[in-house]
Amino acid sequence: MDDETRTSQLRFLDNSRLESPLVEPLDVCTQTGTKIGTFDGVVVDPVERRVRYLVVDRGRVFHKRCLIPMAAARVDAAHHELRIDVDDTDTNAWERFDPVTFPTFSDEDLVTAMFST
């Protein structure tokens, strides 16, 4: 499958549609504990049943969302943090996220994710 086809099947799943503890504002931190932003959602591939990117809002007043390729991650519910396995030096290389680039995850996508082989 070529890159364009693979990208066209990706879907954005906003954090407001996820279950706890990811529904509340959750800080995203690097492996060394440096805060890089707030968790805003995920970009998923329903056919492959995989999260491809985390969407992290790095803005303080205005949205400044970026796509972070999915790496190992762990939710620290006690500290309201999502720790991802990235280096502090990676932060400038992430692609900006534009919500219109990816269709919203739909009920049809859920069926695809559940029953695709």
Image (spheres, grey):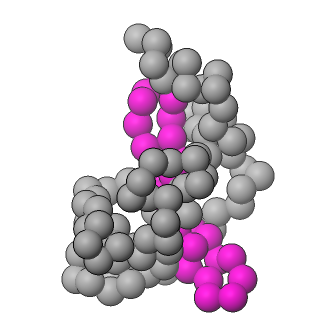
Asked where in the image residue 111 lies, by quadrant, the reply is: top right
Question: Can residue 38 be seen in the rendering of this structure?
Answer: yes
Question: Can residue 89 be seen in the rendering of this structure?
Answer: no
Q: State left or right for residue 106 relative to residue 75.
A: right
- Against 110, residue 73 (above or below) is below
Q: Residue at x 29, y 77 (%)?
A: 79
Q: Percent from the top left, x then y, of residue 3?
A: 56, 37
Q: State left or right for residue 102 relative to residue 71.
A: right
Q: Residue at x 41, y 11 (%)?
A: 117
Q: State left or right for residue 10 relative to residue 53.
A: right
- Against 51, residue 114 (above or below) is above
- Against 62, residue 80 (above or below) is above
Q: Residue at x 48, y 23 (%)?
A: 113
Q: Residue at x 50, y 59 (%)?
A: 23
Asked where in the image residue 50 lies, by quadrant, the reply is: top left
Q: Percent from the top left, x then y, of residue 37?
A: 48, 78
Asked where in the image residue 65 lies, by quadrant, the reply is: bottom right
- Image label count: 0
Most extreme residue toward the left, as rendered?
32
Q: Percent from the top left, x then y, of residue 22?
A: 43, 58
> Which one is nearer the viewer's eye here, 12 or 81?
81
Q: Which residues are magenta?
A: 42-66
Q: Is residue 54 magenta?
A: yes
